[in-house]
Amino acid sequence: MKTIKEFYKKPQNPIKVIQFGEGNFMRGFIDYLIDVSNEKGLFQGDVAIVKPRKGTLEKFNEQKNVYTVSLRGLKDGKVYVENRLVHCIQKVIGSYEQYDEFMALAKLDSLEYVVSNTTEAGIVYDATDVLAATPPTSYPAKLTKFLYERFQAFHGDKAKGLILLPLELIEGNGQKLKECILGYSKLWQLEEEFAQWICSANTFCDTLVDRIVTGYPKDEVDELQKKFGYRDDLLTAAEPFGLWVVEPERDLAAQLPWSSDTISIVLTKDLKPYRDTKVRILNGTHTSMVLGAYLAGHDYVRQCMEDETMYKFISKTVMTEIVPTVELSKEEAVQFANSVFERFQNPFVKHALLSIALNSVSKWRTRILPTFKDHYRAQHSVPKFLTFSFAALIAFYRSGSFINGELIGSRDGEAYVIQDDPKVMEFIGTRLDKPVAEFTALFAKQTEFWGEDLTTYDGFVDEVSKDLTAIKTLGMKQFIEQFVSE
Ligand SMILES: NC(=O)c1ccc[n+]([C@@H]2O[C@H](COP(=O)([O-])OP(=O)(O)OC[C@H]3O[C@@H](n4cnc5c(N)ncnc54)[C@H](O)[C@@H]3O)[C@@H](O)[C@H]2O)c1
Ligand SMILES: O=P(O)(O)OC[C@@H](O)[C@@H](O)[C@H](O)[C@H](O)CO
């Protein structure tokens, strides 16, 4: 079989975008969008990817940075299939392994945009980061050093500032990134003119992205590659739906230059309602269902939508506990929820519950806790389904054993790997023998995980412990059946 590198084309465009993060989401969203825009003659710019962490870039090198995005699903009620070869990635650089090449990008006259997705863990300020490191550890520290290099190379020319579009799924991502950069500028005692240049020559945007990108479709890859007639180790599967909401800190001189039929770009002065609705309804539904559903025997999102009991659980959670807390009118919120359900039912997308389960503690905090609190304030009681999702999280994390710093769960004897922040793993792993109620109270009290003490919500610990005891007796599947029919 041919390999995809045979489709490599010599770059025609200057590098206009530096991208931090080489993951599935970026490949299935922004690189796809830029590639389509280049084809339409709208952008004529290529991307240089910088890998923010150590590690291999072998797959990119082996296929000369060309790869396929496979979009499949329903669009406007009809089956939509698009298999696009993406050519817009000109370079892929390891920030550790090719530090000088990374820094050289700062001097590119053609550079206009910085995009990133370094997960929720990426945009952090770490006061131990030093300017002399090549590179510093955190993503914002790397970016500060990069921008400082650019500031120096162009002698503070305001025209050489960039538009920064972080895609991380955290609130106020653009402003948070800017705060970190200004923090490093101060910590490293860089000249005041640099901080001024950051603020006046660069435009930081808060953004919200929405597209389900499931990545490498390992179960169907043979069939797909046979159809394509070539091998592609970076094949990225996603749904055709795409939305990018952008709130720039000041008016952009022009609209963003990208456009595609499958990704809508919305420029707004207030991103919050979009963000709250999407994160609470879409991501909140994911996080509230996956851990229980996995223990009940399911592996993929679509299976849950096809299972009568799980579907009842999901729709009750969303319609009774999440929808009433979003800012939209009830009608709009229900409509949005139904469109999300349709996307979850996409027959072509296999979204693994275990991939969504990654880092569930921070996801519960950001994607469920705000809804939980709004509901508690309005009803003066804990929401039953969201409270259960906390019990499901504990059941999922405490089902197995702690071996050499790894938590290995067990679903009826079948092992699964639990992945979360090392502090979470250590906390849970060293308390597996604690009785349920004691563990629940201790865990709920960890302000480091939740940002507050969850035991202050009346009835929370009791409800969670009650659910956990029943889950132990009945098993997750039977418990959920009973729970939704109450
Ligand atoms: N996959 C989706 O459907 C989807 C949709 C919308 C948003 N997102 C967001 O995108 C993020 C990445 O998802 P993905 O599917 O691309 O995952 P992935 O595992 O394919 O990629 C993760 C990326 O993050 C980088 N990264 C990880 N930890 C980092 C750290 N501590 N510092 C700097 N960089 C780090 C990696 O280098 C890699 O580029 C998720 O956190 C998610 O919130 C994903
Ligand atoms: O990508 P994660 O792991 O942060 O979250 C899992 C899913 O909730 C997420 O990927 C959604 O599918 C996505 O946010 C849809 O836009």
Image (tube, rainbow, N blue to C red):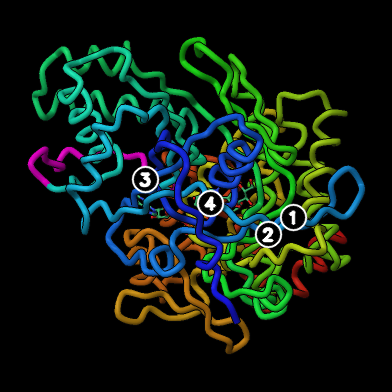
Disc 3 Cβ-to-ligand 1 distance below 8 Å: yes
The quadrant in which residue 266 appears is top right
Q: Which quarter shows the N terminus?
A: bottom right
What is the distance, in whole Å, between disc 4 and disc 3 at their CAs? Answer: 27 Å
Closest to the camera, between mark 1 and mark 4, is 4
Closest to the camera, between mark 3 and mark 2, is 2
What is the distance, in whole Å, between disc 3 and disc 2 at their CAs? Answer: 27 Å
Seen as rendered, the residue at the extreme bottom is 413
Marks 2 and 1: in contact by CB < 8 Å? yes
Q: Nearer the viewer, residue 55 or 120?
A: 55
The residue at the point 74 percent across, 38 percent down is: 261
Q: Identify the magenta region.
A: 119-133
Q: Amino acid at mark 3?
A: Gly
Mark toward the start of the polypeptide (3 vs 2): 2
Q: Amino acid at mark 4?
A: His
What is the distance, in whole Å, between disc 1 and disc 2 at their CAs? Answer: 6 Å
What is the distance, in whole Å, between disc 1 and disc 4 at their CAs? Answer: 15 Å
Mark toward the start of the polypeptide (1 vs 3): 1
Which disc is residue 87 wearing?
Answer: 4
